[in-house]
Image (cartoon, rainbow, N blue to C red):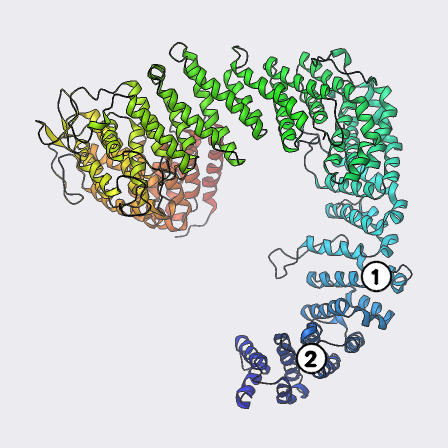
Amino acid sequence: MAETTQLTRHIESYVDTSSSSPSLQAASLNAIASLVKTDVLPLEALVREMGLYLTTTDNVIRARGILLLAEVITRVESKPLDSATIHSLVGFFKDRLADWRAVRGALVGCLALIRRKSVLGTVTSSDATAISQSFFQYMQVQSLGQYDRKLCFELLDCLLEHYSDALTTLGDGLIYGVCEAIDAEKDPECLMLAFHIVQSLAQLYPDSSGLLASFAKDIFDILEPYFPIHFTHPSNGDTHVQRDDLSRSLMSAFSSTPLFEPFVIPLLLEKLSSSLHSAKIDSLKYLRVCSSKYGAERIAKYAKSIWFSIKDTLSTYLGEPNFSLNMAPVDSIGFPENEFVMEALFLLQQLIVQNSSLLTSIIIDDEDVNIIFNTIASYEIYDAIPVQENKKLHAIGRILYIASKSTVTSCNAVYGGLSRMIDKLGVSVSNTDSSPNGDIFPSQRVKFGFLYLCIELLAGFRELIVGSDEPALQYAIEHATCCTWLHDFSSSLFNAFGSVLVASADRCPLDPDIYIGVKGLQTLAMFHSEVFSLQKSIFENILKKFMSIIIEDFNKKLLWEAALKALCHIGSFVQEFHESEKAMSYGSLVVEKIVEFLFLDDIVVPFSVKVEVLSNIGMTGMKNMVTCLQGMKKAVFSNLSKVHTNSRSSEVVVELLECYACKLLPWIHENGGSEDFAVQFAMDIWSQAGNCTVFSTSFEEKGLLDALIKTMKLSVGSCSVESQNLIIQNAYSILSSRTNFQLKELESLPLSPGKYNISLTDEGIISLFASVVIAVCPKTLIPNMRVLVPLFIVTLLRGIVPVAQALGSILNKLVSTSSSAENSSDITLEEALDAIFNTKLWFSSIDMLQRCNGTSNGKEIVLSDICLGFANDKLLQINAICGLSWIGKGLLLRGHEGIKDITITFLECLIPGTKSALPLVMKSEDQIQDPLVMKSAADAFHVLMSDSEVCLNKKFHATIRPLYKQRFFSSMMPILLQLIAKAYSSSSRSFLYRALAHVLSDTPMVAVLNDAKKLVPVLLDCLSMLTEDIQDKDLLYGLLLVLSGILTEKNGKEAVIENAHIIINCLIKLLDYPHKMLVRETAIQCLVALSELPHGRIYPMRTQVLRAISKSLDDTKRVVRHEAVKCRQTWASMSSRTLHF
C-alpha cells in the first residue's frame, strides 16, 4: 500500500484549492489515479482514507473530496471492479445528488459508473433506475452553471442509451423530467445533448399510441423556439459547436418521431414565407428530412401546400440558365448555384420518390404548368419569350427534370402528360426515319419552349437510366411509357432540334437557340443502349450533323465550338459506358473523318484548328486516341518528306508535334496508356533522320528542329529504361553511320583541318541525339560515352546548345565510381569531368579547332581557357561560356564541388585582366573583355540558378539535391558583393550587378531575407542599372519581385526602414517604365507596402510620391490605373495619422 503520509499530501493538495495551483492539483489527481490503477492503492482503501473529506460539514472541502473520488473513478475506467463495489459507489454518488454544493462530483461519479464497459463491471438496471430517480428528484438542471448542466445532459443521454429498458419503469416521470431539464436551455453544447436526448426518447417510445404520444405537443413546444437556430456565439469562442451542427441536431430531433408531424410540418410551411434567410433554407432542409421520416401517408395531406412552396421558391430564386456548353454540365441544363433552389429541388425529389403518383398528378394538373405549355406554343425563339414567362418556363423545366429522373412512375407520368400537349406545339408525331444524310429543313422549326422542356425531360430520363443498375429496374424502364414515347418521337426530336441549328445559322447566331439545338442532339445521342436503344440511323445522323458543322461551318464560331464540345461529350460517353455499336459508328463517322479532315487542303479552316479538333476528339477515349495518333503520325512524316518542296509543310509538322508533345502525350500517361506509340514514334523519327536527303532541308528550319527535339525529349523521357535503351542504340547507329563525324578517330587521332565544318544535317542529327541523352534515366546505357564526350565538347564550341545541355545531363546522372553496381556506363563521373576539363585543343586561323595529341604545332588550351579568351575568338568564347554554364548546372543540381571552379571561370570573365586569384585580388585592366562575352558570363548565372523546362528537371530524371539554390546563394553572395565593391571598371561592375541580379531573382525568398540588410542597397543599384536596356525587362521584373518580397516580410523590415528614401526614389523611377506593364504595377504595389513603415521615415516623401503616382493615373493599362488609385488613397490619407518614431 502507498505510504499514508504521501497519499494524504496528494489528497490535501487536491482538496485544498487555496494552497495549491491548478497544475499541482492535476498532478496530485494523476498520482492518486496511478496508484489505484496499478493496485498499489485499493479503491476501498482510498475511500476509507478520504472518509473525512467526503463527509465533512465544510462545503468546499466536501465538494472537492467528492469530486476527487469521482475523477479517480473516471481515470480508472479500464480497471475491473466487482459488483459490490460498483453498487456501493452508485449508492454514494446518487445520494450526493441531493447535496447541491457537491453536485458536480456526484454527476461526474455517476457518469463514470454509467459509462463502464460490461467486461469490467457495470451498473445494474436497478442501480441505473435508482440514479435516474435520484436525478429527477433532486436536480434542478436549469439552475446550474453551464458545465454542470452539460454533465446533467451527458448523464441523461448515457442512461437513455445504455439503460433505456430500466428507465421505462419511471413512466411519465421520465418525460416530465426530461422536459423540465431541457426547457429554456441556451448553451450550444448543452443543446446538442438535449436534442439527442429527445431522439432517444422517441426511439424509446416509437408506438403512436405509446406514452410519448400524449406528451408530443409539450416536447414540441419546448423545441419550437429554437427553430430556426439563431447562433450568437462567436466563431472563435470556447465552444466547438457551429450553427450547422446545432441545426442538424434539431432537425434530427424534429424528425425523430412521426408524432411530431401535426406540429412540425405546419411550422416549417409557415417559416417558408419568412424573410429570414436561415428560416427559409432550414425549412426546406427540415421538410425534406421530416418527409422522409414521417412517411408518405402522413405527408400526403401537405403535398399540395409543399408543392406550391417549392414552385414559388423556384420562380423567385432560379436564375437564368447558362446557355453555354463550356459552362453547362454534361447531363442537364446548367443554372447558377443557389442554395434555395438546390434545397427546393432536393425536397421535390424526396416527395416524388416517396409518393410518385400523387406528386406527378399535382404537377401535371397544376394551372401554371398548363399555362406554360399553352403559352410557349406561340414563341419560336428565346428572345421572343417575355421575362416573366421565361422565369416560369425555367422553373417548370427544372420541375420536369426532377420528376423524370426520380422514379419510373413519375417519369412515365410527365412523359404521358407531355404527349397530350404535343399537338399544340408543332411537332410531327410520325415515326418516319430521318433522312439518311442527316439533312434538316428549316420548315420543320419547332417552338423554343417545347424543345427547352424536352431537353429537361430527356436529361432527367437519362439520369434515371444511369442510376438503374438493378436488372429489375432496367426491365421496368425498358417497358415504361417514357421509353415508348421516346422511341416513337426520337426521329421527330432529331428533326426538331436540328431545325433550330439551321434557323440559327441563317440568322445572327444566338447562344440560347444554338445551345438548345446542340444540347438536344447531344442528350439524345447519350442514352444507354442496354435500356433504351436509339435507332442507329438517328445516332449516326446526329454525328453527321455535328461533323458537317465542324467541316463546313467554321465561320459560325459559336455553333462550331458547341458542335465540337458535343462530339467530345458523346465520344467520352460511348467509351466510358462501352457502347460497342455506337463506338463503331463514332469511330467511322467522327474519328476517321477527323483524321481525313487533317489532310484536306482548304483555306477556310486553319490547320491549327484542325489539330485542335484532332486532339479533342482523341482525348475522348484511348481507342480514339490511338486512331488519332496514327493519323497524326502519318501527317507528320508525309509533310516532313515535302519540307524541301513545300514551305507550308514545315509549319504543319511543327503544329502537329507541338500538339502531340503538349497535349496528347501527357493525356496518354494520365489515363494509363501504353508507351508503345511513344517508343515507335521516336524510332520512326530516327528512321526518317537516317534519310539525309529528307533532313538536309528539314533542319534549315530552326522551328522544325526545335519541335523535333522537344518531341523526342518528351517521348523518350516518358519511356521505361528498356525502351530508352532501344531508342538510344538506334539513335547512336544513325549518328555514327549517317553523319560526317569520324567517331572512331576521336580518341586516337588529332582532328584534321576541315573535318569539323558541320553541315546542317549533322547539326540536326547531333542535336536530336543530344535530346535523347537529355531525357534518359540514369540507369539507361548511353553507348560509347568515351567517344561521345569529346564529340560533344567539339560541337558545343560550334554553338549547338542541346549538346551542352546533354553534357550537363550526363554529368548530373553519372555515378561517381566505376565499381558501383548502379553504374550503367563505360565511363565514371570523374573520368567524364577529366575528359571535359582537361581535353587539350588548339586553335589556328586555318582549322579553327583541332584536338592536340602532343605532336601538333598549336597552342594547347582547355575549355576554361577558351572561356577566358585565350583563343582570341569572341564567338568561340561565347559558345564555350554557354556550354560551361549547362555543364555547371548539371553539377550544381547534384551538389558536386566542381561547380566552384566553373563559377570562378565565369567571374574571371567579368573582371578586366588576366586570370586572377579570386576573390581577393583585382588585377589592372591590361586586357579589355568584349561586352558580349561579359554579358554571356553574367547570364551563365541565370542558367545555373533558373528552373529549366528543356533539361535537367524531374521530368527528364535529373538528380536534384535539396536546397541546392540556397547553398549556391550563400557561397556566391559574399564573393559577388566583394567583387562589386572593389570593381573599378564601370563595365565590369555593371555585369557583376547583372550576375548578382540573376542569382537573387532565382533564389528562394527565405534565403534572401536572411541577408536582406546587406542586399537591399545593391539590389537597388541593380534595379537602376537594368532600366536602361529593353532586353533586361524580365530580369528587372524578377528583381522587383524580390524587393516586393522583402518589403512584405517582417524579416526584411529593418533593412527597408534604413533605406526607405532610396527605395522610394528607385520605385518612383519605375512608375513610367515603358517596356513591361508588370514592372509598373509591381512598383506601385511596393509603394503601397512602404506606406506601412513608421510614419516619421516615409512622411517626408509623401508629396514626391503623390506627384509621381498622379502620372500613373493616366497609364494605358487599366490594372496599373487601378493600383495607382489605391496607392494615391493610401499615401494621401497619411496626413491624418499621428507621427510616431
Amino acid under disc 1: Ile
Query: Residue 643 appears at what percent x and percent y?
Result: 40, 13
Where does label 1 land, which residue? Answer: 219
The quarter holding residue 8 reads bottom right
The quarter holding residue 54 reads bottom right
Residue positioned 71% across, 68% down in the render: 154
Q: For the N terminus, which image quadrant? A: bottom right
Left or right: 775 in relation to 468: left
Query: Residue 898 appears at what percent x and percent y?
Result: 24, 43
Residue positioned 45% across, 50% down in the render: 1138
Label 2 neighbourhood size at 10 Å, few (<14), some (14-19), many (20+)? many
Cβ–Cβ under 8 Å for marks 2 and 1: no
Residue 102: assigned label: 2
Residue 324 seen from this side: no
Query: Residue 468 appears at what percent x and percent y?
Result: 75, 38
Q: Nearer the viewer, residue 975 or 783?
A: 783
Q: Is residue 858 above or below residue 644?
A: below
Q: Nearer the viewer, residue 541 or 452?
A: 541
